[in-house]
Amino acid sequence: MEKKPYHHGDLKKDLIENGIKIINSEGISALTMRKVAEMCHVSATAAYKHFKNKEDLMEAIRSDIAKDFSAYLESCLTNSDPRMQMLEIGIGYVKYMLAHKEYYYLMFCSELNIEVTFENGDFSYPEDSPFRVFYESAEACISPHVPDSVLRHNKILMMWSEVHGIAGLLCNHVLKTTEDIDRLVANMLLSVSNQIS
């Protein structure tokens, strides 16, 4: 196939976006540098100028999605009240997942996992993890009422499980509902918050 010159100068972004398309339609095993280059109408050599190998591209895909999700969650924060911010983050989390269902599998069900660790009552996660935004919001909401960090982190885990769980159920069409999603998520989080404050 004859390769066309790449004029618009955003090949790296196109390689990432087409890499996501390949993974979603055919699985991670189908992703190759040659295949993603062909989708961008460039040579594999051009692709290797941006990513040294498939693993490097996969890490860029993971990082790109994580940063986009994190930025979206941060943009949801419009209220100064920590409790309202927690609702904004929870609603934003579900809305982002529903708007980007193709990311759900990549972020949480593949080897590109955005991993969160919970050990001895404490969380650890990569700095670019969307969970960081959720955690910081939940911590600000709960900490005035729950001084014990282990108990507080268990409650945050419960809140994240609720939000992530409803997002997963909706994205995978396991749960069908005509309920208003904002109200549904807010009520779920408020039920936990009311047990705390």
Image (cartoon, rainbow, N blue to C red):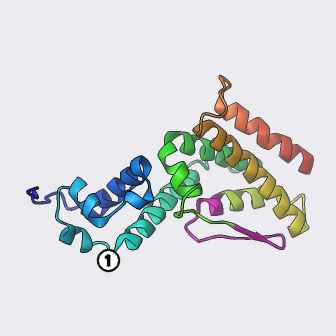
In the figure, is residue 147 to the left or right of 23?
right
The residue under the point 21% across, 67% down is 44
Magenta segment range? 117-133
Q: Depth check: give the residue in front, 157 or 51.
A: 51
Please give the residue where the numbered disc 1 appears in the rendered image: 52
Q: Depth check: give the residue in front, 122 or 53.
A: 53
Residue 18 x %, y %: 32, 54
Q: Quadrant of the N terminus?
A: bottom left
Residue 155 x %, y %: 84, 56
Q: Is residue 7 shown in magenta?
A: no
Q: Is residue 118 visible?
A: yes
Tell me: residue 50, above or below residue 104. below
Residue 165 x %, y %: 70, 45
Q: Is residue 197 visible?
A: no
Question: Where on the picture, by quarter, is residue 194?
Answer: top right
Question: Where on the picture, by quarter, is residue 27?
Answer: bottom left
> What type is the residue that disc 1 sits on?
Lys
Residue located farthest toward the front when viewing the structure as drawn: 29
The local crowd at label 1, few if under 14, some if 14 to 19, many if 20 or more residues have their Cα within 10 Å, is few
Q: Is residue 127 shown in magenta?
A: yes
